[in-house]
Amino acid sequence: MASSSSSLTFIPPIEIDGQKAASFATTDFADQINMCEKFLIGSFVGRRLPYTMVKETLMKIWNLKGEFTLTIHGESVFVFKFNSDDDRQQALEYGPVYIANRLFIVRPWKPFLE
């Protein structure tokens, strides 16, 4: 077993509306939150279309100067990471688009986004 110089401490759960929950400070995740604030989140109203169709269509519609990476989170959320802040802003300003007659909404990432 490898040894570690850090030690873990037990923090008992808190109770919220009769349910046990973990308590933590957002400062514990500040670096991750700052990184994710640069992402855009996209989702369809209704059933999700295939990844390739979404990426290719948005590349044509947005006509960006640089590249972006696209991943799927869960069943229906698309996560966009842009190489350029200008491209991110352009995609955000473009607003909702229709892809194969389905409304696709893009918005900035926020903690606890539903």
Image (cartoon, rainbow, N blue to C red):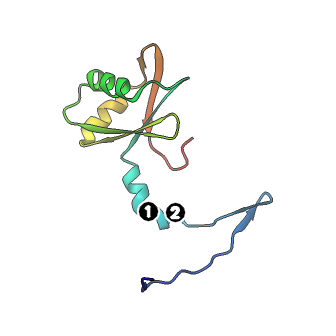
Q: Is residue 70 left or right of residue 60?
A: right
On the rendered structure, is 56 left or right of 46?
left
The kind of residue on which mark 2 rests is Thr
Asked if 24 appears above or below 33 in the picture, the reply is below
Which element carries disc 1, helix, strand or loop?
A: helix
Query: What residue sits 48% from the left and 46% below the top?
Result: 110
Residue 34 appears at what percent x and percent y?
A: 39, 56
Q: Residue at x 46, y 63 (%)?
A: 29
Residue 74, horizontal then vertical, whole percent: 51, 41
> Vertically, is 49 above or below 35?
above
**Amino acid type of disc 1?**
Ala
Q: Which mark is residue 30?
A: 1
The answer to whether residue 9 is above or below residue 75 is: below
> Which residue is rendered at x = 68% and y = 74% of the image?
12
Residue 57 x, y percent position in the rendering:
32, 22
Q: CA distance from mark 1 to mark 2?
A: 6 Å
Give the number of the disc on residue 26.
Answer: 2
Occupied quadrant, residue 83: top left
Is mark 1 in CB contact (under 8 Å) with mark 2? yes
Question: Foreground residue, 111 or 3?
Answer: 3
Callout 2: SS: helix
